[in-house]
Image (cartoon, rainbow, N blue to C red):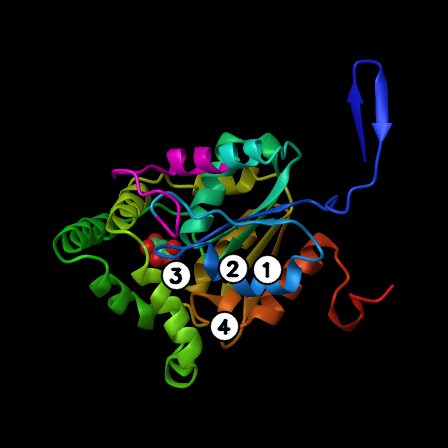
Amino acid sequence: MSDTYDDFTMSYMDSCDRTPLLMLHAFPLDSSMWELQFQDMQDVTRLIAPDLRGHGVSNATEPPYSMTQLVDDCAGLLDNLGIHVPVIVCGLSMGGYLAFEFYRRYPERVAGLILASTRASADSEAGKKGRDEMITAVAEQGVKQIADAMLPRLLSPQTLAEDDELTEYVHDIMLHTSPKGVIGALHAMKNRPDSTPMLANIDVPTLVIHGENDQLIPVSEAKAMANTIPNAELVILPNAAHLPNLEQPEPFNDAIMDFMGITHGNDHHHI
Ligand code: MLT
């Protein structure tokens, strides 16, 4: 790499010189949903996974939030980290809605997109009504009943029946999301624009990843996106529902590393 200051160009090596990955989490989760991506990929590239406003241990400011505000928070984080090179934005579900918004606002900061378990369209009228009902429910009863109701929709029946550790892991993340964060994000998702018109104009390499058994967002949405985005690859993961990064971490991570041109598998720690 090299950096130019006035009349002098300094060349240097940097162990973080791969394109960084900005990892945007789903609703109502936080950055710890990327634990299995960090375990596998932190040695091969730089991963930056914020807790969005009101989620994880980031502050919960007063709702409502907007998609614009949430991506501006992320751009501010990159600025604070001194990351001015374009990054790959990897967003899962709500994180994917944010990836579209980030690309709309900061196209020059995006080297590639990874759209996981997400859709381009806006909420339908019925979907918006459902958001309002959830907002009322959280305001009145807190987060637990949303967490309980969402859990069986996020994971496959097999995981729910056989993998208590993963099931509890996901449930616990949701239980730790603040009511303000949940309400704020519901407003942001309800009011998000339709990203379908921009699909044909996306001019960065794009990877679309989707669990074959996703009940929240059908796999047909992923196929339609991948067909419309000019330079898109589609990876459909069997035996995975809405969180393929946790249910099928190896093929999920392999798809990302292939997309980034990183050699991996048994040989990736060899010299
Ligand atoms: C998510 O997984 O981020 C959300 O369930 C997406 C949504 O509610 O639209």
Question: Mark 2–mark 4 contact, CB under 8 Å?
Answer: no
Q: Are marks 1 and 2 in contact (CB under 8 Å)?
A: yes
Label 2 crowd (10 A; few <14 / some 14-19 / many >=20): some
- Are discs 4 and 1 less than 8 Å apart at CB? no
- The crowding category of the residue bearing disc 4, from other C-alpha atoms within 10 Å (few below 14, some 14 to 19, many at least 20), is many
Q: Position of residue 25 (x, y in %)?
A: 45, 53
Q: On the rendered structure, is 256 left or right of 74?
A: right
Residue 213 visible in the displayed image: yes
Residue 150 is marked as none
In this figure, which residue is indicated by the disc labeled 4? 247
Residue range highlighted in magenta: 55-74
Question: Principal SS element in the magenta part?
Answer: loop
Q: Is residue 94 magenta?
A: no
Total numbered labels placed on residues in the image: 4
Image disc number at residue 217: 3
Distance (Cα) linking label 2 and label 4: 12 Å
Neighbour tally class for label 1: few under 14, some 14-19, many 20 plus, Cα within 10 Å: some
Q: Give whichever of 250, 202 is nearer the camera.
A: 250
Q: CA distance from mark 3 to mark 4?
A: 16 Å
Q: Mark 1 — residue?
A: 38
Is residue 214 shown above or below 52?
Answer: below
Dot placed on the residue nearer the N-terminal end, 2 or 4: 2
